[in-house]
Image (cartoon, rainbow, N blue to C red):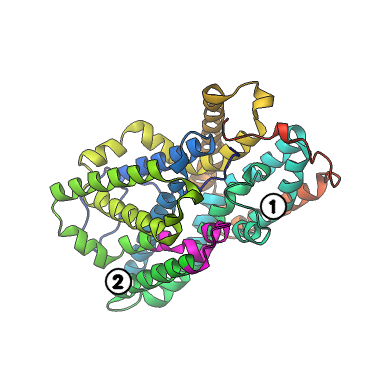
Amino acid sequence: MPLRPHPSAAPSPVHHRTRAAPSPAPGAPRRHIAPLDGLRGLAVLGVLFFHAGHFDGGFLGVDLFFVLSGFLITGLLLTEARARDGRIDLLAFWGRRARRLLPALAVVLAGTLLLVWALGPPNLLRYALDDGPWVTANLANWHFVADRVGYWDSADTRVFSHLWSIAVEEQFYVVWPLVLCLVARGRCAGRRVAAVAVAGAVASLVLMVVLTTPADTTRVYEGTDTRAFSLLLGALAATPPAARLVSRVGEGAAGRWSLALGAGIGTYWVVADGQNSPSLFQGGLFLHALAAALLVAFLGRAPRTPAGRFLAAAPLRRLGLISYSLYLWHWPVYLVLSEERLGLAGAPRTAVLLAVSVALAQLSKVLVEDPVRFRARWAKGRTGAVALVVTFAVLAALWAAVPRPRTGEGSVDVTRLASVDG
């Protein structure tokens, strides 16, 4: 069975070092919710084992990441809008997102290209050179759709195929704050935001149902318009109307709902089988995202219930805190460290792949992400903008410097590609 592309790990938003507490009243500033780190950890584990060929339903981790991103980003933006009379500083928001996401992504792009140039087969290098600029422009998903890169059967030739979901999130981060600037003002701002989120999610579902073709579901799986409902359902859960509804549920009931929703989501992951489960694209993904949004909301209401304590366990939280960089690195690692190169298959190879991926993710967080995000004064303001331009220029120069393999070179060298049976 060929190695399939993975649903992306959603970038982690700001992590405040505060203790989890019962949900604040609507309108209060949001605090850090510890179980959500663990939820990210479970999501990335699903993706990792899916790509290693051990868990067919693990691709659904992408929806958890999308829902979490919609929830957390919308919460931060609404908190800012309430504090500033409906105004949102878009440049500051986009600057924070750039500092959070782009340094690690730039290192992965450059590092992966050099690794593939040195160690990978020619066809892997050729596709990396083709796909890299689209990744840099945050348009990788539309590039893969236009190139008809089948999500379920062609990913083992594209070392950047997993970055389609990062593109979806980045596009959301550009458009959604603009929408909030228009509707999150004055009285009833929360209701308007909730209404827009509901309308957008329903429209996105309709597009998925209408555009789905059984022969290839890549268009609806990777399209920003047809995946927006996951992000928007998460956004809906962060609005004041949703918070008021959830606040009416007692903490004990919220805990029971969290357990039930978690069990239902886990069961769906076990029975789902990619495009061999047609119901996914006829409402299944929407219902899964809705269940995830409810789970996030109830975890926020009652983080110290059994489900919350399980998700807040240290191992899951640590995985969640490196989930973005782990997502970025794992797929290139899987492809470069093929069975042939490692001399391993099955569980032993998977153990090596996981260990290498986690090590690279931890190094990325400690050496790249946290310093730029929290300590580098030059990363803000005008110097930050200059650094961004320089980074893009360096990536462009690297792309131009790496020699492109001749057409046809290595086209039959399929033994060096990873397989899902890994």
The residue at which mark 1 appears reads as: 131
Q: Quadrant of the C terminus?
A: top right
Is 102 situated above or below 177?
Answer: above
Give the extent of the magenta segment. Answer: 210-232
Answer yes or no: is residue 18 visible: no
Q: Where's residue 244, x and y in %? A: 20, 64
Residue 211 forms part of the magenta stretch:
yes
- Per the model, the C-alpha gap separating discs 2 and 1 is 40 Å
* Camera-nearest label, 2 or 1: 1
Q: Where's residue 404, x and y in %? A: 82, 46
Q: Amino acid at mark 1?
A: Asp
**Left-right relation of 401 to 243:** right
Is 250 situated above or below 196?
Answer: above
The residue at which mark 2 appears reads as: 190
> How many other residues sit within 10 Å of disc 2, few (<14), some (14-19) or many (≥20)?
many
**Left-right relation of 55 to 253:** right
